[in-house]
Image (cartoon, rainbow, N blue to C red):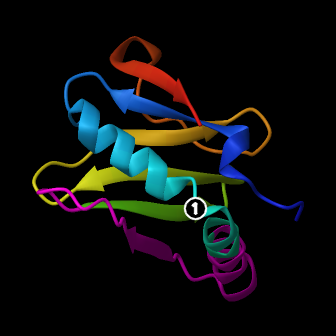
Amino acid sequence: MNRFSLSDCNILWNKRKKPGGRDRVAIKTDLETMSKIVGEAMTYTRDKVLKENRETMVRFWLNTGTRIGYYIEIHYDAGLKAWGFSIDSEDKGGLGEIVSEKWPFLQILLDEDVEAETF
């Protein structure tokens, strides 16, 4: 797999659930430090499905220093040959997704329901 970088991606914030401005900045700031570990999680989840036929999801808590705890979840869909990459919180799910033109990522949220932001 080519070297993964979140700079090749966009965040699609769910317009109805997106966190406030400071929290969004904190989430994005922490994600910007995570390209290597996210790339490793992508390889791991893909290999678990393809080699062991075992659906696997990886969850990382984000170091945001905010009142609410945020995390990302990564899984690989073998049928679609793409990763799902969601941003969630302790109190409400579905805050956003990571998508990319370069990498095969699933987009579950509808275009009219999201606000795109680059890294």
Please provide percent x and percent y for residue 86. 42, 50
- Does the magenta portion include 74? no
> Which residue: 51% across, 77% down?
56
Q: Where, by quadrant of the figure, is residue 44 drawn? A: bottom right
> Which residue: 43% across, 62% down?
73
Nearest the camera: 13 or 45? 13
Label 1: element kind: loop
- Does the magenta portion include 53? yes
Nearest the camera: 49 or 75? 75
Please provide percent x and percent y for residue 12. 46, 30
Q: Count numbered badges in the picture.
A: 1
Please provide percent x and percent y for residue 38. 61, 66
Q: Where, by quadrant of the figure, is residue 101 drawn? A: top right
Label 1 environment density (alpha carbons within 10 Å; few <14, some 14–19, many ≥20): few
> Which residue: 53% across, 64% down?
75
Q: Can I make out residue 95 in this image?
A: no
Q: Can I make out residue 61 in this image?
A: yes
Which quarter of the figure is the N terminus placed in?
A: bottom right
Q: At label 1, which amino acid type do we have? A: Thr
The region drawn magenta spans 42-69
Q: Is residue 84 above or below residue 76?
A: above
Q: Is residue 19 left or right of residue 4?
A: left
Q: Is residue 5 above or below residue 61?
A: above
Q: Residue pushed farthest bottom?
A: 52
> Which residue: 26% across, 38% down?
22
Q: Is residue 114 left or right of residue 19?
A: right
Query: To which residue does mark 1 refer?
Result: 33
